[in-house]
Each structure stands twice: as structure tokens, then as C-alpha cells.
Amino acid sequence: MPRHDRLRNGSSVRSTIAAAAARLMAEDGISDYHHAKKKAARQLGLPDNVGFPDNAEVEAELRAYRELYQGDIHPEMLAAMRHSALELMELLTAFNPWLTGSVLDGTAGEHSSIDILLFADSAKEVEIFLLNRGIDVSHAQPRNDKVEAVLQVETDTVDANLIILPPHLERVSLKHRDGRPRERMRAAELHLLLKE
């Protein structure tokens, strides 16, 4: 029996795809969950209509992968990224920064970016603030219609995405594409986390 037939008939299809997608995300730097799941299914020889795991399942596998294969370097790398995020958040205090994404949830790796939500009346005001401090800025395509702009800056560890939203959305609970609430953290909480 071919491998893909065994997988299709077994109850472990979702977990097999989740594990393969997590490996792709960790090793190849794929950040889009759907893309990682599609590529994993293709590599496993599964049909296009196979049931994919949800993002939470892939995230759990990614944590397990990092602990198993990168356990000696990952905690140090993650702490360095979080320190960089904290420095950036302290610089950008005027724009009510919140850390979110893989650096916060602990799944970040060498190919990850720091994601910081900022709340400002205009993206231009954030860009001018950064340029006045000698920080080079580039622009990325927003993935959400609520986002006014995404500014990218370099830190001493990895690049950071400054995701700029209107001030009235600060109290709105943002969600992942799969509907789970998106975790976020203020600088003071991040400071305490780094002390642990």
C-alpha cells in the first residue's frame, strides 16, 4: 500500500501534515501557515482535498520541533528577540505598542520577524518619528484591510514589522485567520517575562 493511501486512511493525517508543516516553518522559514500545510501535504503525496490541521495544531508541532531539535539554542535566540522587541517598544511608547506573533508565543526562529502593533493617527507620523532618529524604514504589504501600513525596521537580532492600526482599534480583540484570539503584550509585561 502506497504511503499516501496509508495516511489517507489513518486518523493521523492531520498530525502528520501538522508535523511536516512545522518542520518546513522551522527549517525553511515559511511563515504562512496555509502555505506550509499545502507544501507539507504535497511533499507527503497527499491529494489536494485532504483535510488540513488547524493553525493551533501546527503551532503545537512547531513548539515540539523547536524543543526537540533546537532546544539548546532556541531559548537563547527567543530571549534575544524579545529583548530587541522590548527596546523597540520602549522607543515607540508614544504609539501604544503591543508585541504579538511568534516572538511573543515562543515559536519564533531564525527566519522569524518581530511583530509589533502600533496605534497611530497616521503611518506617516510613525515613519517620520523613526527617520528623525536615524532608523531606516521600508514598507511591506499589509495582510489585513484594517492595517494602515506595515513598516519594517532592522533590530540587532531580526527585522521587525511595525503594524500600524488606527487608535480606535486598540481595544478591539484581533484574531488569527483561524478565529483564535491573537495574543498581545505590553512592554511592562514583556519586561517581567524576560526576568523569569
Image: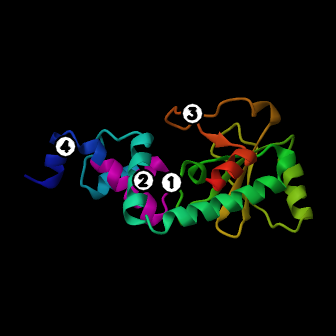
Q: Which mark, residue 181? A: 3
Judging by the rendered image, the residue that carries numbered circle 1 is: 107
Mark closer to the chain start, 2 or 4 = 4
Residue contact between numbered discs 1 and 2, judged by CB atoms under 8 Å? yes
**Which residue: 70% across, 57% down?**
85
Amino acid type at circle 2 is Leu
**Going by the picture, which residue comes out furthest to the left?**
1
Which is more N-terminal, label 2 or label 1?
A: 2
Image side of residue 66 versus residue 173, left or right: left
User: Which residue in the protein does label 4 denote?
Assistant: 8
Q: Position of residue 162 (x, y in %)?
A: 73, 52
Taking the image as shown, residue 18 lies to the left or right of residue 118, namely left
Tell me the amino acid under the disc marked 3: Pro
Q: Looking at numbered disc 1 in the image, what kind of residue is underneath it?
A: Thr
Tags 2 and 4 in contact by the CB under 8 Å rule?
no
Q: CA distance from mark 4 to mark 1?
A: 28 Å
Q: Main secondary structure of the magenta part?
A: helix
Residue assigned mark 2: 62
Q: Secondary structure at mark 1?
A: loop
| Dot placed on the residue nearer the N-terminal end, 3 or 2 | 2
Residue pictured at 68% horizontal, 61% vertical: 83
Q: Which residues are magenta?
A: 16-36
Foreground of the two, 48 or 63: 63
Q: Residues within 10 Å of mark 3 (few under 14, many from 20)?
A: few
Q: Does 28 lie within the magenta span?
A: yes
Closer to the chain start, of discs 4 and 1, is: 4
